Image (spheres, rainbow, N blue to C red):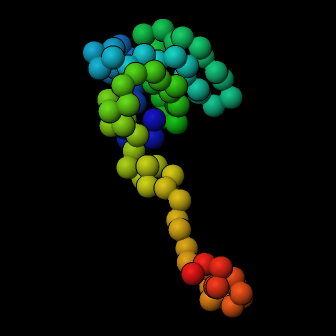
Amino acid sequence: MPEGSGYVGKTIAETQLDEHDINVLTLYRGAKIIPNPKHTRVLEPNDKLLCFGKLEAMRGMVPVKTRRRRQPEVADLPADAYSASDAEVLD
């Protein structure tokens, strides 16, 4: 939960994750690991949730910046990275 998230300051029950068929299995808060957190637990900034549910429903919870960062960048090899004999094999 990044700071400024709509979930920060709400209890797990108030987030209405159950209505979207998302179950909160574990709450990570700093160095603490809270398995099966109660629905009355209030979410704080930088909390991490391990959830189980439909992928489409959970995708909306992941911030856009985080999703972009996870995509690997593909770079072209420089021309001097392979020899002429390697180019014959590629053809």
Splitting the image into 4 quarters, where does residue 85 fall?
bottom right
| Residue 76 vertical placement versus 46 (above, below) | below
Residue 32 point in image, percent of width and height: 66, 23
**Residue at image coords 38%, 31%:** 55
Residue 78 point in image, percent of width and height: 62, 85
Splitting the image into 4 quarters, where does residue 4 fall?
top left
For this rendering, which residue is in front, 35 or 14?
35
Residue 44 point in image, percent of width and height: 48, 29
Give the quarter of the figure containing the C terminus. Answer: bottom right
Residue 90 point in image, percent of width and height: 60, 78
Give the quarter of the figure containing the N terminus. Answer: top left
Number of on-image labels: 0
| Residue 31 vertical placement versus 84 (above, below) | above
**Residue at image coords 62%, 89%:** 79
**Residue at image coords 38%, 49%:** 64
- Residue 91 appears anywhere in the view: yes
Splitting the image into 4 quarters, where does residue 57 fall?
top left
Q: In the picture provided, is 64 more to the left or to the right than 73?
A: left
- Which residue lies most toward the left here? 19
Q: In the picture provided, is 32 more to the left or to the right than 52?
A: right
| Residue 3 vertical placement versus 41 (above, below) | below
- Residue 11 appears anywhere in the view: no
